[in-house]
Structures are given as C-alpha cells and as structure tokens.
Amino acid sequence: MKGYKDCVLRIDLTSGSIGREKLNEEYVKRYLGGEGYGVALLWDEVPHDAEPLSEKNILSFNTGPLTGTPMASASRTSINFLSPLSNTIGSSNMGSHFGAELKFAGYDSVIFEGKADKPVIVVIDDDKVEIREASHLWGKNTRETTEMLYEELGKEFKISCIGQGGEMLSSLACIFSDDCFAGRGGAGAVMGSKNLKAVAVRGTGKIEIEDKDRFLEINAVAIKEIRDEVYTWGPVHGYGTPAWLDGANECGMLPTRNFRQNYFEKLEPIMPYNLWNNREKFDVRRRACYSCQLGCHKYVVMKNTGSGEDVGIGELEYETIAALGPRCGVNSYEDIAMANYYLTIYGLDTISGGATISAAMELFEEGIITKEDLDGLELNFGNGKAMVELIRKMGLREGCGDLFADGSQVAAEKIGGRALDYTMTVKGMEISATDPRGSSAMTVSFGTSERGACHMRPYAATIDAFGYLYPDLGVEEPRDPFDDSESKEWLKSVKEFFVVTNLIGICDFNVINCELHATTLAALYTALTGIDTDKEELLRKAERTIALERALNYERGFRREDDKLPNRFMTEGAFAGPPKGRKVDMESALDRYYEACSYDKEKAIPTREKFQELGMEDIYNGLLAQK
Ligand code: SF4
C-alpha cells in the first residue's frame, strides 16, 4: 500500500521494550488512518473504563496516508488517548513538521504504553529508536526543552514535548511542536503521566506514490480550489485566522464576557491589522506547517516589554485572541499576548485556558469567589493584568492557580454552590469561540462532539451563518442558522468530511470555507495508494470512526444528556446582532441530528441496523450494555 509506511512503532515505557509491527490492515480498511487508527487502538487495547492518567491509557501519534506527501497542508498527526479533561475519547490534531518527519523515518504511528519510572525522552532516528533518561529536561518549559534538544541532537530533529503543565498533570495540558499544538483534551497530561517529556524524530526516507503524475495533477486542482476561495486566500492568508474576528462579531457569534454577550463592542484595537501596523511594538513573522499553501501561522514577537527584552509570544490565532480577549472582556493586545506566552511556554490549551479565566471572572463578578480566594487578584471582566497573572499561576499550579489548572468545570465542582451555572462546557471541555445562538449547526457541533465541545466537528457556521454552499457535499441551498428543527442531514456529511481530514492527514483550514472538494481528496487518495476510492467511501470511513468513538464514550457512561449545551444558551436570549433574543432549542436540534445519523435517541449511539450497515456488528456486540 503506497502512501502508508506499513510500520507502527510500539514503545512500552514500563519495561523499556521497543517493538515494530505491521499496520493493522483491518483498521485501514475500516477507518483509513490518523484519528480512526488511534481510536481503534483505544477500543481494542485499553480497558474501556480505564482512568485517563493511569498506566492503562495509551497515547498514540497517528499520521494519515497523505501526511508527508506534497499535498497542500499534509502535515497532520492525530494524537489519541482517553481524555483527562472530558473523560471521553481524546483526539487532538497537530500540524508542524513532526508527522511528516515520522513518515520519513518509516512509521505511520507510534504507540506509547505504560509509564517510565523516571523522566525520559524517545529519540527516533530512522531505524534507530532509543528511550533516553531526561531528568535534566524535567521542569523546563516547552521552548527551553525544544532548544536543549536541538543542542543535544541537532536542529534537523523535529520535537514534540510538554511543558510544566503536562508534568503537573493539568487537564488543560497540550503537546507542543514548534509552536503548533495538540491542544485540546489534555494530551499533554497523558504524556506527563507517562513521564514522557519529549519525542524527537529525524527521518531520511521518502513516501512512495503509486501514480506520481496523476497525484501531482490532482494536487494542482486541490491547490486551485484552496486559492480560489477569496476569503481564505485573501485575509486569512494575509493575517491568519484572526481575520475572522470581525465577521464573527458582526454575525453575533463572538463570545463575550463568558457568553453573557455575543458581541464585543471594543474589538477594533485587537483586529489583526492593528497588530501588523504597530511595528514599534510587534514583529510578525509568517510561518507554515509542512507543505502548507495557506500558511495561517503568524509568529508574534513583542518588543520593548517591561523587562526591556523582546518576547517571542508565539502564534496568536483566532481562537486564542477570542478566548483571551472578548471572552474575558479584554481588549489590550499586550495582555492577550502575554497570556498566550505563558500558555505556550507552560504548554496549556489556549482555548480552555482563556475560557477558564472567563468563567472565573464571572464567578468573581457574581460574588461566588472573592479576592481572598484569588491571592488578591481583582478578577473583573476586562482586567487583563489579572488574567495574565492567573494564567501564569495556572501553568505552575501556584497558589490559586491550582484551583483552575484542570479547567473551569473541575474548578466549579470544587467551589460548589451555583458555580457550575457559569461553566460553559460540554462533557467537561470548554466551548470554543462561536456563540451557538447564532448558528444551529454549531449547537449540534458543540453538543455532539465526541471529544467534548469542539468547534471543528465540524465548523459548520460557515454554511448556516455565513452562507457558504458546498455542492460537493450536497449543500446547494443556503441553510437557516436559527431553525433547530431543520433537517441536519447536510450537517452529517459536513461533519464526516471534517473527520476525513483527520484520517487522511491534512489540515481542516483547507475545508473550513468549503474550499477543497471531497471528490478531489478521494482522487488524491486513489493516485497515492492505488486503492480505488470515491468521496462516499471516504465519508463512510469517517462515519465508522465517529460510530466507534460514540461506542467507546457509551462504554464510559455517556448518553444523550451529555450531548447538550449549558443552560445559558437555552434560557438566555442572544444579546445582540442577527440572533438577538434567540435561544437554542436543544432537544429539536439533537432529534434532527440523531435522525440524520440513525442514532438511538436515548443511547446516543448508532442503532444496531446502522452498525450492521457500516460493517461494525462486532463493535455493537462488544458494547457492555448489549450483553
Ligand atoms: S493552514 Fe495553518 S495550521 Fe493548517 S497546515 Fe497551514 S499553517 Fe498549519
């Protein structure tokens, strides 16, 4: 099978054994690769009731068949685990150059099992794979760790590592790779629980392509599709994802002050052109993941800081600015930048990090927590300096930072009383930067995402709120963003296509504005592997992956009531903009979506007939409740 390397590395950190095995053909046949491969490993190898931070959990890095090829944005690695944040399946997707290098070294996936008895790193240098003692790196932040490994191993190694957040088992901890992140769900905490500080990889091999001429021909079509989308190839290519801020605001979908509002009246100072125009204060450098055309990354350096030193802030993207800015009522770019800096170096997810601060701000304003609980911080909405200080404390679990280091829901459960009313989470994961009152599709995306509230499963506000069409996926007419009782058939296909990107190894930002066609991707897969496929088959593999994730969540106790948004969206009308006054009708939205997917409406998993149709009767029969 060209495209794949047909080799999986299995590393048992408890015993120190390193093994190689062939790619599981059944997994590839059913789920294609990437996220699908990682979830199949979880289903088959991890006890379904395992504690996420126990030795029983596994952490796998899974590339897709396209990863490392010349296809645009073929950079992606899916990292799979049981999530300490949501207790569901954990699936976090990362760009950078790490996944491509892993393929060049000869591996489709790497599985980490067990737990090392002291801090270690794993060094993969083509065929040579070693577990090395790494106590000297423990306690170092993500940037320091990366720099030290460059010095030890050479700069041609690609590094994935954790910061202090992962070492201290924060449920918000992510995995850092060259200022890209496997951000959501606590992958960094799982890595920390295994005493695995970093993975370094260097590869000198290449990826075989079955029909190279055809592949390059279709790749040119794919690139044209991406470049033909004017918003993507205009503002997003130029300014990065922060270009979306004013559109989200105008559509009444920009979470403001912990979703009390859906419109931020002070947005102008944090629009990206102001950053780019302020050359006295900021330097912005263009960067891109492996083989990316779009290059959404804009690396920010802040000059003339209080310390007199320039600070490499890192990537300031839409979700980060939205979480640390409007959601916290903050409109100081410098405060947002410093908060992002601490989240980056300590290795915490910027979305959940900012969302947790915004929930804490509302708790403070409601009098549920006080200055005394916050080491003297006056945590009102808009207090950017207090936000930065609380994030710094969270990263090190220092003082009151410990209370918030595992996210807003855990903090609210510890605080008790009415605190949970202000927690904007689904399945324990903080909702990202879209107000679902402005998009019925996002109501379903956040509510039903298998890993907890996730904006990429799918980001369908593009279609119902912004009015894009997607004829290749059957969306030929505009959809009504305010009708929760509308059929969600179309949303099923769009979600599956977003999952296909995670299976095959490309970036979602190639499909988020309906750029790349599913038909084109299927043709690329065929040219790469020689396996005849079409878009329906790609979507079916995604449907199977989602079904397997739902089955595993079901085993872990998740049901329909866990597929719901926080009450605020059902009881408080939107504050401004097109959805002004609108509340979510969650039950209708769920019913329509479950009908479209053929789910049992109470169990929230596919029906037996659906599992049979997908060729997954063994999974259905394996469900505990069916025995
Ligand atoms: S669009 Fe951005 S995140 Fe996606 S592959 Fe390109 S640079 Fe990386």
Image: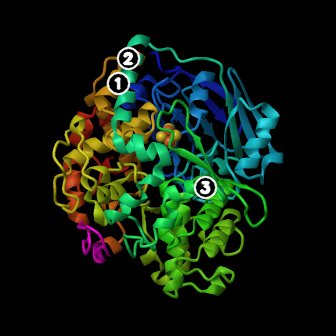
The magenta span reads: 570-585
Q: Are marks 3 and 1 in contact (CB under 8 Å)?
A: no
- Front tag of 2 and 3: 2
- Indicate left or right for 610 with 12 as reference: left
For marks 3 and 1, give the CA distance: 38 Å
Labels 2 and 1 touching (C-beta < 8 A): yes
Location of residue 566 with respect to 128 vertically, above or below: below
Disc 2 from disc 1: Cα separation: 7 Å
Q: Hey, which quadrant is residue 15 in on the image?
A: top right
CB at mark 1 closer than 8 A to ligand 1?
Answer: no
Picture coordinates of residue 447 (x, y %)? 34, 59
> For numbered disc 3, what is the local secondary structure?
loop
Q: Which class describes the residues within 10 Å of circle 2: few (<14), some (14-19), or many (20+)? A: few
Who is closer to the viewer here, 339 or 570?
339
Task: Say the numbered circle drawn on residue 217.
Answer: 2
**Secondary structure found at label 1:** helix
Location of residue 551 in the rendering, given as x and y in whole percent from the top left corner: 36, 46
* Residue 584 located within the stretch drawn in magenta: yes
| Relative height, residue 370 to residue 180 (above, below) | below
What residue appears at the point 70 percent right and 44 percent down from the top-left corner?
196
What amino acid does circle 2 point to?
Answer: Glu
Image point (40%, 38%), residue name = 510
Q: Depth-wise, is mark 3 or mark 1 nearer the camera?
A: 1
What residue is disc 3 on?
173
The image's mark for residue 221 is 1
203 displayed left or right of 297: right
User: Residue 270: where, in percent of width, then height?
Assistant: 51, 63
Type of amino acid at the residue the image marks with label 3: Ala
Give the percent coordinates (x, y) of residue 513. Answer: 34, 44
Crowding around mark 3 (Cα neighbors within 10 Å: few <14, some 14 to 19, many 20+) is many
